[in-house]
Image: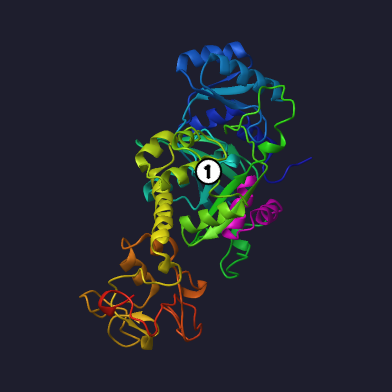
């Protein structure tokens, strides 16, 4: 019987840890130093050579089953013994730790004509050491430089070709050292995975459907893109929004069950423990993150009454860490201190800090909830010009001088640039165009900033009316 898509040899090379490491070295890609072992004694001997902590990855298991991180000899005996038991071939890879490194994955597709496309990049908010299924993930990647992304993209194409996935999708995971930029390949799934479902929903690219068509002989350039209906599937998707996935856990349902493999702990590791997930889209990371947190249907301020020293103890990888981080930011803990404790990239922590600052600003400026008095220094509001600031007619208000010597404003992108740094709230919510309104107390029939004659009211509406807004009545 012939297999289509990924052949048996490709599955073996992708899933067999030792064969995968050999394949990566053949194409010049770096992998963490590791050894395939068949007994606890072999694993202990290798761990003494490389030092602790070490990561245990059993062969041919799904969801990281049986794997884990061992910080000392006693933990290695427990984790490796369990991994060898649960592996169908009773082997496991013991490898050097890359805990704390940044983790990324690329969703890749290939057809029989050797056309390879990257559907999307995905970045884990949680650093290495947490299974991707248990980590908060963001698409597209937010903290990669273009040079790093292109290097990772080239590596992903080399991996899928070397492993031999003739057609279909694959998921390739990388670790990147946050200081040196050293990149290593962690693993590859030579199949459609949970991340493939996330990538499909995030981009609108039907990975499973396209993979099935490629398996029966179609090429990517012969299949239409379901979203654009004009370009072929060989064009890589590009999105102008951010997608955040947060896993859902249910530890409370299993507290009373007997556990023969040790006590039940909420600490997250390389073995997947989540039972589901929520996904949210937004124009910014902050918007998507907050939507996803609300989608979990948990009390986002549940830790508000917890003492600071107790919150600091919740910074290890666990389902409540994101809430503890937000609460500590509200209480003024520095980003650098949180980074040292969690190894979460400072960019993400600064984004969450801006959310906390916006919350604090709203508490002290309740009038900001209903409108835009917070936009200071942008020039007088001119409702007769379709909601623009500054002087000039409809065609020129976006670039002419305002009363404070700066340019007037008309298009939403220009407004966004002008308000950057003034207040946290515009940075958090400001958006416009056909997406509608984030901050408004529109009166009358204001067509809105960025509005168009064919979509009246589609822009950001700005408050105007009988009362004077802003200092000296100039601007809002």
In the image, residue 447 lies at what x, y percent? 46, 83
Residue 387 quadrant: bottom left
Q: Is residue 236 within the magenta segment?
A: no
Name the secondary structure under disc 1: loop
Crowd tier of the residue under label 1, counting other residues whose Cα lies within 10 Å: few below 14, some 14–19, many 20 or above? some
Residue 115 in view: no
On screen, residue 380 versus residue 445, left or right, reads left
Which quadrant is the C terminus positioned in?
bottom left
Q: Circle 1 sits on which residue?
A: 303
- The foreground one among 396 and 338 is 338
Which quadrant is the N terminus positioned in?
top right
332 up-or-down from 471: above or below: above
In the image, residue 293 lies at what x, y percent? 56, 52
- The foreground one among 291 and 66 is 291
- The foreground one among 16 and 398 is 398
In this picture, which residue range is highlighted in magenta? 193-217
Decide whether the magenta segment is chiefly helix, strand or loop: helix
The residue located at (49%, 81%) in the rendering is 457
167 up-or-down from 55: above or below: below
């Amino acid at each position: 019987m012939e297999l289509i898509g990924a052949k048996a040899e490709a599955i073996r090379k992708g899933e067999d840890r030792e064969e995968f490491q050999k394949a990566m070295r053949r194409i010049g890609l770096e992998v963490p130093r590791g050894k395939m072992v068949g007994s606890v004694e072999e694993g202990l001997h290798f761990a003494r050579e490389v030092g602790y902590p070490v990561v245990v990855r059993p062969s041919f298991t799904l969801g990281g089953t049986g794997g884990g991180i061992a910080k000392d000899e006693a933990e290695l005996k427990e984790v490796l013994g369990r991994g060898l038991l649960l592996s169908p071939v009773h082997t496991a890879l013991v490898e050097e730790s890359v805990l704390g490194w940044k983790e990324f994955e690329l969703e890749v597709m290939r057809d029989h004509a050797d056309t390879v496309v990257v559907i999307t990049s995905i970045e884990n908010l949680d650093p290495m050491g947490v299974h991707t299924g248990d980590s908060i993930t963001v698409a597209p990647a937010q903290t990669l430089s273009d040079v790093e992304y292109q290097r990772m993209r080239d590596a992903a194409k080399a991996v899928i070709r070397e492993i031999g996935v003739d057609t279909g999708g694959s998921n390739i995971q990388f670790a990147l050292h946050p200081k040196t930029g050293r990149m290593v390949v962690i693993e590859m799934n030579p199949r459609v995975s949970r991340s493939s479902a996330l990538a499909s929903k995030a981009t609108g690219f039907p990975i499973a459907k396209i993979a099935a068509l490629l398996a029966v002989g179609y090429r990517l350039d012969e299949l239409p893109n379901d979203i654009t209906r004009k370009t072929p599937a060989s064009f890589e998707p590009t999105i102008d929004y951010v997608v955040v996935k947060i896993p859902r856990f249910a530890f409370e349902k299993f507290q009373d069950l007997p556990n023969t493999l040790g006590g039940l702990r909420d600490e997250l590791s390389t073995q997947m423990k989540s039972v589901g997930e929520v996904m949210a889209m937004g124009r910014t990371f902050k918007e998507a993150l907050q939507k996803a947190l609300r989608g979990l249907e948990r009390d986002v301020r549940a830790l508000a009454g917890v003492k600071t020293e107790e919150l600091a103890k919740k910074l290890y990888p666990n389902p409540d860490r994101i809430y503890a981080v937000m609460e500590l930011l509200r209480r003024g803990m520095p980003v650098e201190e949180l980074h040292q404790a969690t190894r979460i990239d400072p960019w993400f922590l600064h984004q969450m800090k801006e959310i906390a600052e916006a919350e604090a600003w709203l508490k002290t400026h309740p009038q900001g909830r209903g409108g835009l008095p917070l936009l200071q220094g942008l020039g007088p509001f001119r409702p007769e010009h379709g909601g623009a600031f500054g002087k000039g007619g409809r065609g020129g208000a976006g670039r002419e001088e305002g009363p404070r010597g700066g340019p007037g404003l008309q298009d939403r992108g220009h407004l966004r640039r002008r308000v950057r740094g003034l207040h946290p709230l515009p940075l958090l919510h400001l958006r416009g165009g056909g997406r509608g309104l984030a901050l408004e107390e529109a009166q009358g029939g204001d067509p809105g900033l960025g509005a168009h004659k064919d979509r009246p009211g589609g822009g950001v509406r700005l408050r105007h009316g009988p009362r004077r807004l802003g200092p000296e009545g100039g601007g809002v």
